[in-house]
Amino acid sequence: MSADQCPISAYIETKGLRYFPRMLSKIRLMAAGTLREDFHEMIGRGLDARLCNHLRVDYEALREKTLSSTTDEEVFSWVQENGRDINETDILLWNHYVTKLGWRDQVTESLANRKASSGLADRDEIETMIEYFEYDEGRKA
């Protein structure tokens, strides 16, 4: 395995919840020593922390469960039992939030800075953070 792997796309869902599999992917890659280094500083912070807060679970407890589980669905079930029981509306609200983050909001400036530092400043089609991830991590060109 390469020591510079990126997590999976934030668009991938577990039980309808976007970004959740990405957060678990980062946990697993970090534990394996293969997560791309520029992710290390923010692991468990930023969107990871926001999603954990939304789910009402402690990040470290989620990390431990992720590393002892074989599937994302198993971790999701643990969240349902140990955090709050999220319903369809909770998932809809989170998905809308995470899909639009960076588009004319409190994160717009941070997105512009990330685009500039990645040589993507001229890419006007990148309007949200998770769209930026797609380009920065090579899933889109």
Image: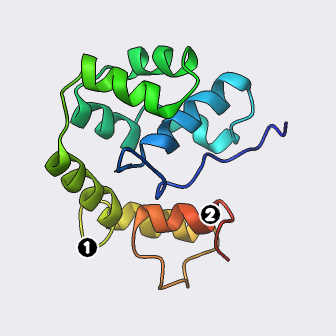
The image quadrant that residue 101 belongs to is bottom left
Question: Does residue 39 lie above or below 110 as drawn?
Answer: above
Residue, far left: 89
Whether residue 45 can be seen here: yes
Q: Are marks 1 and 2 in contact (CB under 8 Å)?
A: no
Compared with 81, 124 (above or below) is below
**Callout 2 amino acid:** Asp
Point 48% across, 38% down: residue: 23
Q: Which is more toward the observer, 29 or 87?
A: 87
Q: Residue at x 42, y 17 (%)?
A: 60
Q: Which residue is disc 2 drawn over?
A: 136
Instruction: Indicate the amino acid at tag 1.
Output: Arg
Q: Which residue is mark 1?
A: 104
Answer with left or right where residue 31 lies relative to residue 128: right
Give the crowd class for mark 2: few <14, some 14-19, many >=20 residues within 10 Å.
some
Q: Position of residue 56 (x, y in %)?
A: 22, 26
Instruction: Tell me where residue 68 appears, x and y as whole percent.
Output: 56, 14
- The outermost residue toward the right is 1
Label 1 residue SS: loop
Depth check, front residue: 58 or 75: 75
> Horizontally, is 31 left or right of 121 in the view?
right
The answer to which image quadrant residue 119 occupies is bottom right
Left or right relative to 125: residue 1: right
